[in-house]
Image: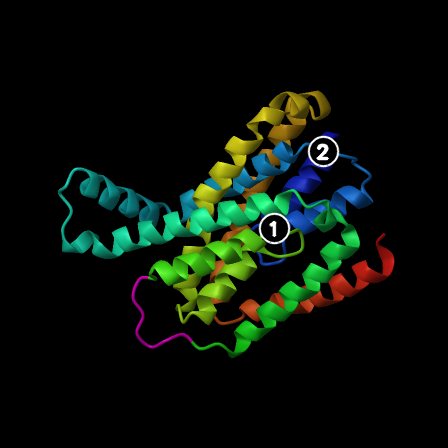
């Protein structure tokens, strides 16, 4: 893989990981069009790690507060001010469990790697995003509980399918559950942190294969590109969610899916 191709994949990952258009779906279709062959899954995971760094940086205050409450709970020094943060940590654990179980099952199905199948899921994601236009958050909302954790975990698990946007389906699931728009975006990306770390650990065995097929320089360029583009994409997405224009991405995904069905093989 050339540096240019790695940068192109990095740009796509940086945009599509945060904007609800499915980064895995775009990467799969792009690899198909660029005739890249079988790029090790670890390369995709490393690009996801780049976006993970962006998530931790943008939500660093929220993440640090969660860790602080966790440490206080471990030290048995937590108080009532930690209650909501501990509930959030439980939600993350529950969501991660269901994401892991569902993700492992889906990732082994080659059926989802077909570009035309990806196009179908682009259309499904477009429909889901469009429905969020008519969802109104509850006037009073507390931290999500176990039920929400299960729902978000399952939603994030389905986000493993190329064409189904992880951010799109988890933010939509949170919105359908009555979470306010800004909080829905925050929750979606915070629960992605352990999921991405877990995926990286599972794919580390492909490290040697990655180095043999992709040069270290190309990996570095792709990684840095993903972080830079991803930062601006995440900032843009949070503004669009807060303004209630999350559904606008359906206008991109619907025609993209239809074109893919017609022209991809």
Mark 2 to mark 1 CA distance (whole Å): 20 Å
First to last magenta residue range: 137-143
Q: Is residue 54 visible?
A: no
| 30 in the magenta segment | no
Q: Residue 177 at what x, y percent from top left?
A: 43, 69
Is disc 1 placed on a helix, strand or loop? Answer: helix
**Residue sitting at 15 percent across and 47 percent down?**
78
| 141 in the magenta segment | yes
Indicate which disc, 2 or 1, sits on the residue closer to the N terminus: 1
State whether residue 211 is above or below residue 251. Answer: above
Q: Residue 16 at what x, y percent from top left?
A: 61, 52
Numbered label attached to residue 39: 2
State whether residue 131 is above or below residue 91. Answer: below
Q: In the figure, is residue 96 to the left or right of 158?
A: left
What is the quadrant of the N terminus in the image? top right
- Foreground residue among 238 and 116: 116
**Residue sitting at 43 percent across and 57 percent down?**
150
Q: Is residue 257 visible?
A: yes
Name the residue tied to disc 1.
15
**Residue sitting at 65 percent across and 48 percent down?**
24
């Amino acid at each position: 893989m050339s540096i240019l191709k790695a940068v192109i994949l990095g740009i796509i990952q940086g945009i599509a990981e945060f904007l609800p258009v499915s980064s895995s779906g775009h990467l799969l279709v792009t690899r198909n069009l660029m005739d890249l062959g079988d790029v090790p899954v670890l390369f995709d995971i490393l690009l996801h790690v780049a976006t993970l760094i962006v998530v931790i940086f943008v939500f660093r205050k929220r993440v640090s507060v969660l860790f602080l409450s966790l440490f206080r709970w471990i030290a048995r020094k937590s108080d009532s001010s930690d209650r909501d943060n501990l509930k959030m940590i439980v939600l993350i654990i529950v969501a991660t469990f269901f994401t892991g179980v569902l993700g492992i099952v889906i990732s082994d199905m080659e059926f989802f790697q077909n570009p035309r199948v990806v196009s179908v899921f682009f259309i499904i994601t477009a429909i889901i995003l469009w429905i969020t236009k008519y969802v109104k958050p509850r006037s009073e909302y507390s931290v999500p509980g176990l039920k929400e954790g299960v729902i978000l975990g399952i939603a994030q698990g389905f986000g493993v399918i190329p064409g189904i946007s992880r951010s799109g389906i988890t933010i939509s699931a949170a919105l359908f559950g009555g979470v306010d728009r800004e909080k829905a975006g925050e929750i979606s990306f915070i629960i992605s942190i352990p999921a991405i770390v877990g995926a990286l650990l599972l794919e580390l065995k492909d490290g040697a294969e990655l180095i043999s097929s992709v040069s270290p320089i190309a990996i570095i360029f792709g990684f840095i590109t993903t972080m830079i583009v991803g930062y601006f994409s995440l900032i843009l997405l949070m503004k669009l969610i807060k303004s209630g224009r999350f559904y606008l991405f359906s206008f991109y995904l619907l025609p993209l899916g239809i074109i893919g069905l017609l022209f991809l093989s």
